[in-house]
């Protein structure tokens, strides 16, 4: 219990620090509103041409888009913590190694706290406006309490999967002179494969299956589709189990990479 409290305190400190950046959050809210309306109007034009040709109804798609914009800071892999990269590249990670904490767990809860703070500052106004918009531009509550419960569970697992994948990017900085190459490739790959740019149901059936099985489909794709009702029943349950599987796998890979990195790390200077 004491160990859990120790890492929760790290999360709380990072969350509190992140809540101070209100001006940046305000700019982010304006940006997310702009992107949200642009996406809605773009898809609206396609739906007006032939609504039956699309795999998601407009109301489900609107919920997906607004959830995506409201929780962008939580689910976007590119919202990485630059302070962690600086710790590794500058050698100041040596100070963290002196602390009586597991380094992987400490960095994991640190990045999770930062993501939660950014999302908490932005999500409220976006969700409120989205709830007040008329159909099919606004978002509504889930169809049932069961769907709401599955959404909450999937939402938490998806956020943890994103944080676990982000840890792989951080740890790669131990093995490279500059983390920018790995960072750019990973972010571009995840944006496309996770449904961040185009929702996964809009891809061909064969690609949908591949994307859904990969860890990227276990991020925002599952909770947002459950909320909108596009994913339900047995399919939703299987997707949540797949999220839990990928969370365990990514954490295991991250810990193995961290162990290997710490065996070869060299800190220059006094």
Image (cartoon, helix red, strand yellow):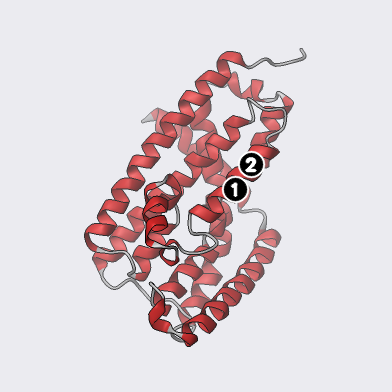
Determine the residue positioned at 33% across, 40% down.
245
The outermost residue toward the left is 234
Query: Which dot marks residue 41?
Result: none
x and y, in percent, of residue 201 in the image: 41, 65
Q: Nearer the viewer, residue 169 or 157?
A: 169
Query: Which dot marks residue 183?
Result: 2
Position of 180 relative to 216 (above/below)? above
x and y, in percent, of residue 37 in the image: 58, 77
The outermost residue toward the right is 269
Determine the residue positioned at 34% across, 60% down.
151
Determine the residue positioned at 58% across, 60% down.
121
Quadrant in which the C terminus appears: top right
Quadrant in which the N terminus appears: top left
Q: CA distance from mark 1 to mark 2?
A: 6 Å
Position of 98 relative to 254 (above/below)? above
Instruction: Report if the CB atoms under discs 1 and 2 are less than 8 Å apart.
Output: yes
- The image quadrant that residue 184 belongs to is top right
Please, what secondary structure does the residue beneath circle 2 have?
Answer: helix
Query: Disc 1 designates what residue?
Result: 187
For the question of whether residue 168 can be seen, the reply is: yes
Position of 75 relative to 148 (above/below)? above
Determine the residue positioned at 56% across, 74% down.
39
């Amino acid at each position: 219990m004491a160990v859990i409290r120790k890492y929760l305190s790290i999360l709380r400190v990072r969350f509190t620090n992140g809540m101070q950046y209100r001006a940046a959050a305000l700019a982010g809210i304006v940006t997310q509103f702009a992107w949200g309306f642009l996406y809605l109007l773009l898809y609206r034009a396609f739906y007006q041409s032939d609504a039956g040709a699309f795999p998601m109804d407009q109301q489900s798609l609107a919920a997906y888009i607004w959830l995506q914009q409201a929780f962008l800071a939580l689910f976007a892999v590119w919202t990485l913590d630059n302070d962690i990269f600086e710790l590794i590249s500058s050698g100041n990670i040596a100070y963290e190694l002196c602390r009586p904490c597991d380094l992987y767990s400490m960095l994991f809860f640190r990045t999770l706290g930062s993501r939660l703070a950014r999302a908490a500052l932005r999500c409220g106004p976006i969700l409120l406006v989205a709830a007040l918009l008329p159909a099919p531009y606004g978002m509504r509550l889930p169809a049932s309490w069961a769907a709401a419960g599955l959404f909450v569970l999937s939402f938490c697992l998806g956020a943890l999967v994103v944080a676990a994948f982000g840890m792989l990017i951080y740890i790669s900085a131990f093995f490279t002179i500059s983390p920018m190459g790995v960072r750019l490739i990973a972010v571009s790959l995840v944006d496309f494969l996770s449904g961040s740019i185009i929702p996964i149901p809009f891809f061909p059936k064969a690609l949908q299956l591949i994307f859904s099985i990969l860890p990227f489909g276990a991020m925002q794709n599952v909770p947002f589709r459950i909320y909108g009702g596009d994913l339900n029943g047995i399919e939703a349950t299987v997707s949540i189990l797949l999220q839990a599987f990928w969370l365990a796998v990514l954490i295991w890979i991250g810990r193995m990479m961290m162990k290997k990195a710490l065996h070869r790390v060299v800190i220059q200077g006094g």
